[in-house]
Amino acid sequence: MNKKLICLSLLFLLQFLATSCDPCSCGPIKTYERINKKLNIKSWDTSGFQNRETTEPVSKNSFGISIFIESELKQIAFTKSKINISSLGFSSAYACSCPPDKYINNTPVISIQILATNSLNSEVIDVTDNFSTYDNFGKQIAIKEYLENKEISNNYEYYSDDYFQLDMTKSDNIPDTTIFTIKIFLQSGEELIEKTQEINFK
């Protein structure tokens, strides 16, 4: 009788260890550092039903710039699954779900500057306030306001590169032939800089 009891106890213990350490077969939780590396920009003609990249003269009332910041991931840690004693080795009645990997952004964007260079006389002016972007509800707001209202958090449970869609909403001081310079300032003190091709406005 005692031998049977011991055998059953050992079987129960083996089942507990096999199913409680990682009941969903999720594997370890990985932590990545997201490092912003490269700035890509495109200029757009937004006059039609679908935006088109600018290859010819464009109206100042329908001009936009998209900003895409490429990043790379560096794994910095992983956490093994913890023993789950709540189920006592038996399958849970509710659905299994795996905790997501974590992403830490140590170089978030803190500000954006847009400069316009007049191709005729090389005059450079700051035109950041001439552009606006969109919040999470699709409302058009100033770039500075968007960055101020953005939730300040360096920890993410998803991976996504930074993307901004900017529309030129004021054009009175924009030269007819212009090269735009986009400067991205990161919290680390680094700057990402890129220029558009020469834009001819009509």
Image: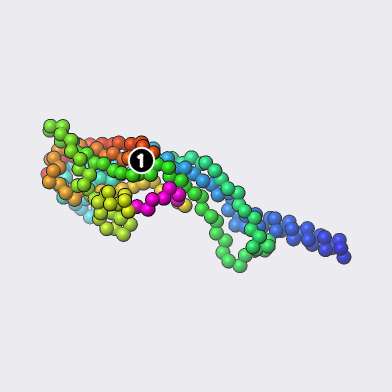
The residue under the point 71% across, 58% down is 15
The answer to whether residue 107 shows anywhere in this view is yes
Q: Which picture quadrant has residue 67?
A: top left
* Identity of the residue furthest to the bottom in this view: 93
Does the magenta portion include 55? no
Question: How would you rate the neighbour count of disc 1 (Cα within 10 Å): few for under 14, some for 14-19, many for 20 or more?
Answer: some
The x and y percentages for residue 11 are: 76, 59
Residues rendered magenta in the picture: 150-156
Query: Which is nearer the eye, 181 or 64?
Result: 181
Does the magenta portion include 154? yes
- Magenta span main SS: loop
Query: Which is nearer the eye, 168 or 76?
Result: 76
| Residue 199 falls left or right of residue 182 | left
Label 1: element kind: strand
| Residue 80 falls left or right of residue 190 | right
Height in image: 21 above or below 120? below
The x and y percentages for residue 38 are: 36, 38
The type of residue carrying mark 1 is Leu
The x and y percentages for residue 111 are: 30, 44
The residue under the point 30% across, 36% down is 193
The answer to whether residue 53 shows anywhere in this view is no
The residue under the point 18% across, 38% down is 125
| Residue 31 falls left or right of residue 1 | left
Which residue was labeled with disc 1?
Answer: 186
